[in-house]
Image (tube, rainbow, N blue to C red):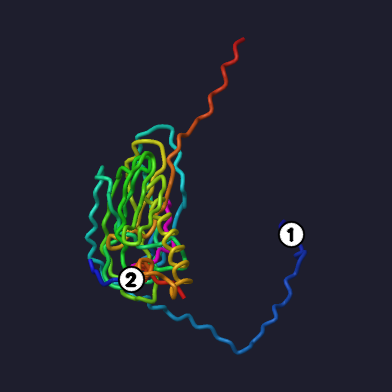
Amino acid sequence: MATATAPIVKQPQADVVDAGLTVQLMPIEWPKPAPAQMDVRVEVGPARRPDRILLGTLSDQGFRVIKPIAVSLEVRDDSTIASWPAVDEFGTGASISNAVEDLGRTVAELYRTLQLDAARLGPDLHAVWEKLQEFVVPRR
Amino acid sequence: MSEDSPIPTLLAFLTCESVIHDAETQKKTLVGIFDRIMSSTVPLQVAGLGLYAKLVEGSGKYTFRIRMVNLKDESQVLDVSIPATWALTEAPLELGVNFRGIPIQAFGTYEFQLYANDAYLGRAVFKVDKLELPQPPPAARG
Protein backbone atom coordinates (compact mmCIF):
# COMPACT_ATOMS: atom_id res chain seq x y z
CA MET A 1 0.00 0.00 0.00
CA ALA A 2 1.45 3.30 -1.00
CA THR A 3 1.82 5.86 1.65
CA ALA A 4 2.61 9.52 1.47
CA THR A 5 3.95 11.87 4.03
CA ALA A 6 3.68 15.56 4.18
CA PRO A 7 6.60 17.39 2.49
CA ILE A 8 9.34 18.54 4.82
CA VAL A 9 9.51 21.96 3.27
CA LYS A 10 6.54 23.86 2.20
CA GLN A 11 7.01 26.56 -0.36
CA PRO A 12 5.61 29.81 0.95
CA GLN A 13 3.19 31.78 -1.09
CA ALA A 14 4.99 34.08 -3.51
CA ASP A 15 4.58 37.76 -2.97
CA VAL A 16 3.37 39.20 -6.18
CA VAL A 17 4.51 42.72 -6.74
CA ASP A 18 2.66 44.69 -9.32
CA ALA A 19 4.63 47.80 -10.04
CA GLY A 20 2.91 48.41 -13.31
CA LEU A 21 6.08 47.72 -15.31
CA THR A 22 6.04 46.02 -18.64
CA VAL A 23 9.00 44.84 -20.66
CA GLN A 24 8.78 44.72 -24.37
CA LEU A 25 11.45 43.11 -26.52
CA MET A 26 12.17 45.13 -29.61
CA PRO A 27 13.89 43.62 -32.63
CA ILE A 28 17.21 45.31 -33.41
CA GLU A 29 17.94 46.08 -37.02
CA TRP A 30 21.68 45.86 -37.53
CA PRO A 31 22.98 47.63 -40.59
CA LYS A 32 23.75 45.19 -43.35
CA PRO A 33 27.15 45.79 -44.89
CA ALA A 34 27.35 46.09 -48.63
CA PRO A 35 28.73 42.93 -50.19
CA ALA A 36 32.45 43.47 -50.45
CA GLN A 37 34.17 43.12 -53.77
CA MET A 38 37.36 41.60 -52.43
CA ASP A 39 40.32 41.34 -54.72
CA VAL A 40 42.85 39.76 -52.39
CA ARG A 41 46.24 39.05 -53.92
CA VAL A 42 48.44 36.49 -52.19
CA GLU A 43 52.07 35.76 -52.97
CA VAL A 44 53.91 33.00 -51.17
CA GLY A 45 57.65 32.68 -51.43
CA PRO A 46 60.84 34.71 -51.50
CA ALA A 47 61.11 38.26 -52.73
CA ARG A 48 63.96 40.72 -52.98
CA ARG A 49 64.88 42.43 -49.73
CA PRO A 50 63.61 46.03 -50.01
CA ASP A 51 66.18 48.83 -50.23
CA ARG A 52 63.62 51.52 -49.40
CA ILE A 53 60.42 51.75 -47.39
CA LEU A 54 57.69 54.34 -46.93
CA LEU A 55 57.34 55.13 -43.26
CA GLY A 56 53.81 55.89 -42.03
CA THR A 57 54.48 56.04 -38.29
CA LEU A 58 57.10 57.47 -35.95
CA SER A 59 56.46 54.86 -33.24
CA ASP A 60 55.78 57.81 -30.93
CA GLN A 61 52.27 58.47 -29.69
CA GLY A 62 52.94 62.20 -29.75
CA PHE A 63 53.17 62.49 -33.52
CA ARG A 64 51.30 61.59 -36.65
CA VAL A 65 52.85 61.12 -40.08
CA ILE A 66 50.78 63.01 -42.65
CA LYS A 67 52.88 62.19 -45.70
CA PRO A 68 54.79 58.93 -46.19
CA ILE A 69 58.49 59.34 -45.44
CA ALA A 70 60.77 57.75 -48.05
CA VAL A 71 63.42 55.88 -46.08
CA SER A 72 66.54 54.25 -47.53
CA LEU A 73 67.55 50.85 -46.17
CA GLU A 74 71.06 49.50 -46.04
CA VAL A 75 72.60 46.40 -44.46
CA ARG A 76 75.99 46.64 -42.76
CA ASP A 77 77.33 43.56 -41.00
CA ASP A 78 74.40 42.31 -38.91
CA SER A 79 72.61 45.65 -38.70
CA THR A 80 70.06 47.41 -40.85
CA ILE A 81 70.39 51.17 -41.25
CA ALA A 82 67.28 53.20 -42.09
CA SER A 83 68.01 56.76 -43.16
CA TRP A 84 65.98 59.82 -44.10
CA PRO A 85 68.45 61.86 -46.14
CA ALA A 86 66.22 64.96 -46.33
CA VAL A 87 66.67 65.58 -42.61
CA ASP A 88 70.01 63.78 -42.31
CA GLU A 89 68.81 61.31 -39.68
CA PHE A 90 69.13 57.56 -39.41
CA GLY A 91 68.15 54.64 -37.20
CA THR A 92 69.67 51.21 -36.73
CA GLY A 93 68.44 47.81 -35.67
CA ALA A 94 68.68 44.08 -36.13
CA SER A 95 65.81 44.17 -38.65
CA ILE A 96 64.12 46.62 -41.00
CA SER A 97 61.30 47.15 -38.52
CA ASN A 98 63.70 47.77 -35.64
CA ALA A 99 65.69 50.23 -37.76
CA VAL A 100 62.66 52.25 -38.94
CA GLU A 101 61.25 52.36 -35.41
CA ASP A 102 64.61 53.67 -34.16
CA LEU A 103 64.56 56.26 -36.95
CA GLY A 104 61.01 57.24 -35.96
CA ARG A 105 62.03 57.87 -32.36
CA THR A 106 65.03 59.90 -33.55
CA VAL A 107 62.82 62.03 -35.80
CA ALA A 108 60.35 62.60 -32.97
CA GLU A 109 63.18 63.74 -30.71
CA LEU A 110 64.51 66.02 -33.46
CA TYR A 111 61.04 67.55 -33.91
CA ARG A 112 60.80 68.34 -30.19
CA THR A 113 64.29 69.84 -30.11
CA LEU A 114 63.77 72.05 -33.16
CA GLN A 115 60.34 73.11 -31.98
CA LEU A 116 61.86 74.52 -28.80
CA ASP A 117 64.43 76.55 -30.75
CA ALA A 118 62.32 77.31 -33.83
CA ALA A 119 62.81 81.06 -33.52
CA ARG A 120 66.61 80.82 -33.34
CA LEU A 121 67.41 78.27 -36.05
CA GLY A 122 70.05 78.89 -38.69
CA PRO A 123 69.25 78.40 -42.38
CA ASP A 124 70.19 74.69 -42.51
CA LEU A 125 68.25 73.69 -39.40
CA HIS A 126 65.37 75.91 -40.45
CA ALA A 127 65.17 73.94 -43.71
CA VAL A 128 65.13 70.70 -41.70
CA TRP A 129 62.40 72.13 -39.45
CA GLU A 130 60.26 73.03 -42.46
CA LYS A 131 60.80 69.58 -43.97
CA LEU A 132 59.76 67.92 -40.72
CA GLN A 133 56.53 69.91 -40.56
CA GLU A 134 55.76 68.84 -44.12
CA PHE A 135 55.69 65.17 -43.05
CA VAL A 136 54.93 65.12 -39.32
CA VAL A 137 52.40 66.84 -37.07
CA PRO A 138 52.16 66.66 -33.29
CA ARG A 139 49.00 65.23 -31.80
CA ARG A 140 46.89 67.56 -29.70
CA MET B 1 44.75 53.02 -54.26
CA SER B 2 44.25 56.64 -53.34
CA GLU B 3 47.10 59.07 -52.72
CA ASP B 4 44.69 61.36 -50.86
CA SER B 5 43.75 58.90 -48.15
CA PRO B 6 45.37 59.90 -44.85
CA ILE B 7 47.88 57.55 -43.24
CA PRO B 8 45.96 55.67 -40.55
CA THR B 9 47.25 55.00 -37.05
CA LEU B 10 47.62 51.39 -35.98
CA LEU B 11 46.16 50.75 -32.51
CA ALA B 12 46.45 46.97 -32.32
CA PHE B 13 47.99 44.23 -34.42
CA LEU B 14 47.66 40.72 -32.98
CA THR B 15 48.29 37.15 -34.03
CA CYS B 16 45.84 34.45 -32.96
CA GLU B 17 44.55 31.07 -34.04
CA SER B 18 41.42 32.42 -35.68
CA VAL B 19 39.42 35.62 -36.14
CA ILE B 20 35.69 35.02 -36.05
CA HIS B 21 33.57 37.67 -37.74
CA ASP B 22 29.92 37.77 -36.69
CA ALA B 23 27.98 38.64 -39.80
CA GLU B 24 25.02 40.12 -37.91
CA THR B 25 26.73 42.41 -35.39
CA GLN B 26 30.05 42.86 -37.27
CA LYS B 27 31.87 42.04 -34.05
CA LYS B 28 35.16 40.18 -34.24
CA THR B 29 36.24 37.51 -31.80
CA LEU B 30 39.91 36.60 -31.49
CA VAL B 31 40.47 32.97 -30.56
CA GLY B 32 43.76 31.85 -29.02
CA ILE B 33 45.97 34.95 -29.07
CA PHE B 34 49.59 33.80 -29.20
CA ASP B 35 53.12 34.90 -29.97
CA ARG B 36 54.86 31.54 -29.93
CA ILE B 37 54.47 28.28 -31.82
CA MET B 38 56.07 25.11 -30.49
CA SER B 39 56.95 22.32 -32.90
CA SER B 40 59.18 19.27 -32.68
CA THR B 41 60.14 19.47 -36.34
CA VAL B 42 60.44 21.84 -39.28
CA PRO B 43 59.37 22.44 -41.97
CA LEU B 44 55.79 22.76 -40.83
CA GLN B 45 52.57 24.33 -41.97
CA VAL B 46 50.63 26.45 -39.48
CA ALA B 47 47.15 24.98 -39.48
CA GLY B 48 45.40 28.21 -38.54
CA LEU B 49 46.73 31.71 -38.04
CA GLY B 50 44.54 34.78 -37.70
CA LEU B 51 45.64 38.39 -37.88
CA TYR B 52 43.68 41.23 -36.35
CA ALA B 53 44.39 44.92 -36.87
CA LYS B 54 42.54 47.94 -35.51
CA LEU B 55 43.20 51.28 -37.13
CA VAL B 56 41.97 54.84 -36.63
CA GLU B 57 42.30 58.24 -38.34
CA GLY B 58 41.76 56.99 -41.86
CA SER B 59 39.25 57.53 -44.64
CA GLY B 60 38.84 56.66 -48.28
CA LYS B 61 40.30 53.89 -50.36
CA TYR B 62 43.27 51.80 -49.24
CA THR B 63 45.24 48.81 -50.27
CA PHE B 64 46.38 47.12 -47.08
CA ARG B 65 49.39 44.92 -47.46
CA ILE B 66 50.44 42.21 -45.03
CA ARG B 67 53.97 40.98 -45.44
CA MET B 68 55.42 38.07 -43.44
CA VAL B 69 59.18 37.75 -43.15
CA ASN B 70 61.70 35.55 -41.37
CA LEU B 71 63.67 37.97 -39.19
CA LYS B 72 66.83 35.92 -39.47
CA ASP B 73 67.46 37.28 -42.97
CA GLU B 74 64.28 39.28 -43.76
CA SER B 75 63.34 36.67 -46.34
CA GLN B 76 59.71 36.93 -47.35
CA VAL B 77 57.30 34.11 -46.52
CA LEU B 78 54.13 35.65 -47.93
CA ASP B 79 52.70 38.91 -49.18
CA VAL B 80 48.97 39.65 -49.18
CA SER B 81 47.24 42.72 -50.60
CA ILE B 82 43.71 43.57 -49.49
CA PRO B 83 41.73 46.47 -50.96
CA ALA B 84 39.36 48.22 -48.56
CA THR B 85 37.20 51.32 -48.37
CA TRP B 86 37.15 53.27 -45.12
CA ALA B 87 33.67 54.72 -45.19
CA LEU B 88 33.24 56.30 -41.75
CA THR B 89 36.13 58.61 -40.87
CA GLU B 90 35.19 58.87 -37.21
CA ALA B 91 34.93 55.08 -36.79
CA PRO B 92 37.85 52.69 -36.43
CA LEU B 93 38.58 50.14 -39.13
CA GLU B 94 39.12 46.51 -38.17
CA LEU B 95 40.90 44.00 -40.34
CA GLY B 96 40.56 40.30 -39.67
CA VAL B 97 42.42 37.83 -41.86
CA ASN B 98 42.67 34.06 -41.46
CA PHE B 99 45.51 32.09 -43.02
CA ARG B 100 45.62 28.34 -43.48
CA GLY B 101 48.82 26.40 -44.08
CA ILE B 102 51.49 29.09 -43.80
CA PRO B 103 54.78 27.35 -44.59
CA ILE B 104 57.49 27.62 -41.92
CA GLN B 105 60.85 26.38 -43.11
CA ALA B 106 62.95 26.96 -39.98
CA PHE B 107 62.78 27.71 -36.27
CA GLY B 108 63.21 31.37 -35.44
CA THR B 109 61.42 34.70 -35.20
CA TYR B 110 58.89 35.81 -37.78
CA GLU B 111 57.14 39.10 -38.32
CA PHE B 112 53.95 40.31 -39.95
CA GLN B 113 54.28 43.86 -41.27
CA LEU B 114 51.24 45.99 -42.04
CA TYR B 115 51.25 48.64 -44.77
CA ALA B 116 48.52 51.05 -45.85
CA ASN B 117 48.96 52.27 -49.42
CA ASP B 118 52.59 51.12 -49.15
CA ALA B 119 53.24 53.11 -45.95
CA TYR B 120 54.59 50.99 -43.08
CA LEU B 121 52.32 51.13 -40.01
CA GLY B 122 53.59 48.46 -37.63
CA ARG B 123 54.26 44.81 -37.00
CA ALA B 124 53.36 41.71 -35.03
CA VAL B 125 56.11 39.28 -34.07
CA PHE B 126 55.90 35.60 -33.21
CA LYS B 127 58.43 32.87 -32.58
CA VAL B 128 58.63 29.30 -33.78
CA ASP B 129 60.49 27.33 -31.12
CA LYS B 130 61.63 23.73 -30.98
CA LEU B 131 59.52 21.55 -28.75
CA GLU B 132 61.81 19.38 -26.65
CA LEU B 133 59.92 16.26 -25.64
CA PRO B 134 60.98 14.69 -22.33
CA GLN B 135 63.00 11.50 -22.75
CA PRO B 136 61.29 8.35 -21.44
CA PRO B 137 63.00 6.84 -18.40
CA PRO B 138 65.23 3.84 -19.14
CA ALA B 139 63.33 0.59 -18.84
CA ALA B 140 63.89 -1.22 -15.55
CA ARG B 141 65.70 -4.51 -15.95
CA GLY B 142 65.00 -7.36 -13.62
Query: The residue under label 1 is which amino acid type?
Result: Thr
Q: Residue B34: x and y, percent?
A: 47, 49
Percent x, y for residue A22?
55, 86
If you read the primary sequence from the N terminus, does the residue marked by circle 2 or circle 1 appear first? 1
* Residue B11 magenta-highlighted: yes
SS for dot 1: loop
Q: Nearer the viewer, residue A95 or A31?
A: A95
Residue A55 in picture, x, y percent from top left: 34, 60
Towards the viewer: B95 or B119: B119
Q: Chain of mark 1?
A: A
Kindly identify which residue carries mark 1. A3
Point out the frontmost of discs 2 and 1: 2
Report the span colored magenta.
Answer: B6-16
Q: Chain of mark 2?
A: A
Q: Quadrant of residue B97?
A: bottom left
B34 to B93, vertically: above or below:
above
Can you say which quadrant of the picture contains the N terminus of chain A? bottom right
Say whether residue B7 is visible.
Answer: yes
Q: Please tell me how crowded label 2 is: few (under 14), some (14-19), or many (20+) other residues with Cα within 10 Å.
A: few
The amino acid type of the residue labelled 2 equals: Glu
Estimate the spatial distance between the alpha carbons at disc 2 and disc 1, rounded to whole Å: 95 Å
- Residue B36 lies in the magenta-colored region: no
Residue closer to the observer: A78 or A26: A78
Q: Which residue is mark 2?
A: A134
Residue A76, by quadrant, is top left
Q: Reply above or below: A100 against A108.
A: above
State the predominant SS element of the stretch in magenta: strand
Q: Residue furthest bottom?
A: A20
The answer to whether marks 2 and 1 mark residues whose Cβ atoms lie closer than 8 Å is no
Q: Is residue B93 visible?
A: no
